[in-house]
Amino acid sequence: MQLKTFNKGEVIFQKDDSGDCMYEVYTGIVGIYSAYGTPEEQLLTEYFPDHYFGEMGLLEKEPRSATAVALKDDTTVAVITEDGFGEFIEKNPVSMLVLLQQMSRNLRKRTNEYVRVCREIKELSEKEGKE
């Protein structure tokens, strides 16, 4: 496991980069963005110390779906590679539970957002149909 430190505004990884590792925030804050650097840029979530991010790329071996950016100077993250993942879990079994809980919370949040947007679209569609 390797530690890397970033200053505010530095990109940790970009959308479509290879997903060959995941990260644990040690210090600072990491923002996850869609459409980073464009007028449509949107902050999706923030991660603080003891949170993991980038696990989808590592587990699925797919390109990154968003961009990760340091939001504070001296943001330090641990880089957990595929080769080191097994050892990381072996040495930190509680971390696997924390990672699964975090993934579950993220999935629940996105599902709730999706349902809310679907409901709003349905209501708009019904409203337009009555006019």
Image (cartoon, rainbow, N blue to C red):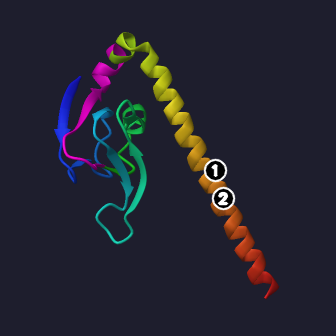
Amino acid type at image mark 1: Asn
In the displayed structure, would residue 67 be above or below residue 42? above
Q: Secondary structure at mark 1?
A: helix
Residue 10 point in image, percent of width and height:
20, 51
Q: Secondary structure at mark 2?
A: helix
In the displayed structure, would residue 21 be above or below residue 108? above
Q: Residues within 10 Å of mark 1 (few under 14, many from 20)?
A: few
What residue is pinned by disc 2? 116
Query: Looking at the figure, which quarter contains the N terminus?
Result: top left
Q: Who's the residue at 71% across and 75% down the image? A: 124
Give residue 51's mark: none
Asked whether the beta carbons under mark 1 and mark 2 sit within 8 Å of each other, the answer is: yes
Query: What segment is highlighted magenta in the picture?
Result: 69-87
Residue 131 point in image, percent of width and height:
78, 88
Residue 65 point in image, percent of width and height:
39, 50
What residue is pinned by disc 1? 112
Q: Who's the residue at 73% across and 76% down the image? A: 125
Q: Who's the residue at 34% across and 72% down the image? A: 39
